[in-house]
Amino acid sequence: MSGRCAACKYVRRRCPSDCILSPYFPSNDPQRFTSVHRIYGASNVAKMLQELLPHLRVEAAETLCYEAQCRIQDPIYGCVGVISQLHQQIQDTECQLAKTRAEIALMNSYGQEPPQAQVDQQI
Amino acid sequence: MSGRCAACKYVRRRCPSDCILSPYFPSNDPQRFTSVHRIYGASNVAKMLQELLPHLRVEAAETLCYEAQCRIQDPIYGCVGVISQLHQQIQDTECQLAKTRAEIALMNSYGQEPPQAQVDQQI
């Protein structure tokens, strides 16, 4: 019974030595498996990992876990909610950048006036 | 046979009048259903929609489709790849903003010098 991965423990089966899920879902972190199982189902996760070359599976398992947790926390938007927030943040930063560039353009336009006029403005 | 939604058509069953998938997976867009079915499985999609209030299901179906399509296009990173790109874009824009603000600070520091010194610098 010991040594089973979180997936095999969950479905109460023997964990084969070549278990596709075992390296990515250790028994000491059952929540990690529960999340992907709830959203994708164990067989779909296994299928998605199986379709990848072994060295690419760690990252795939990691991103599947992240997306599953996002979907559990936000059942309507999932991690598309995170994408929307980031788009908003980009828009805000680009807006600040445009304002700051406009400020520079204004300062430069003062700088292009004849020196005396600029001195007068500052007095 | 006609009038079945894409999900019921796919699994070759009668589409009941209260089909949970029917409003979000019309038969004229079979690819939309195929994507979510491939990633989540039809029963998981139905379960996730069922758990939401009816008026929230359109958005949930939309974001599930988006995430499924991202995962099909990028089987390693899914839409976490999009999130990484957006983080990079934010970092780039914030970097540009910091440089532009530093430029303003430098221009202001010239502006704070006595007027004659500023005029000398410009000549």
Image (cartoon, coloured by chain):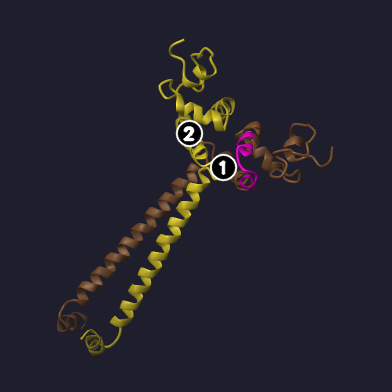
Chain colours: A brown, B yellow
Residue A94 in sight in this render: yes
- Vertical position of residue B50 compared to residue A69: above or below: above
When asked about the image quadrant of residue B48, the answer is top right
Farthest residue to the front: give it: A53
- Percent x, y for residue A59? 60, 48
Residue at (56, 39) in percent of width and height? A71
Report the chain holding disc 1: A
Estimate how packed mark 2 is, as few (under 14), some (14 to 19) or many (20 or more) residues with alpha carbons within 10 Å.
many
Which stretch is magenta? A47-57
When asked about the image quadrant of residue A98, the answer is bottom left
Residue at (55, 30) in percent of width and height? B38
Q: Secondary structure at mark 2?
A: helix
Q: Which residue is mark 1?
A: A67
Farthest residue to the right: give it: A1
As drawn, is A42 to the left or to the right of A108?
Answer: right
Q: Say whether residue B63 is magenta.
A: no
Query: Which mark, by number, is residue B65?
Result: 2
Query: Which mark, by number, is residue A86?
Result: none
As drawn, is B2 to the left or to the right of B116?
Answer: right
Q: Amino acid at mark 2?
A: Cys
Farthest residue to the top: give it: B1
- Percent x, y for residue B117? 26, 89
As drawn, is B84 to the left or to the right of A31?
Answer: left
- Percent x, y for residue A63? 58, 45
Label 1, label 2: how far apart the Cα atoms are: 13 Å
Quadrant occupied by the C terminus of chain A: bottom left
Q: Amino acid at mark 1?
A: Glu
When asked about the image quadrant of residue A20, the answer is top right
Query: In terms of depth relative to the viewer, which is nearer, A117 or B73?
Result: B73
As drawn, is A67 to the left or to the right of A42?
Answer: left
Residue B24 in sight in this render: no
Q: Secondary structure at mark 1?
A: helix
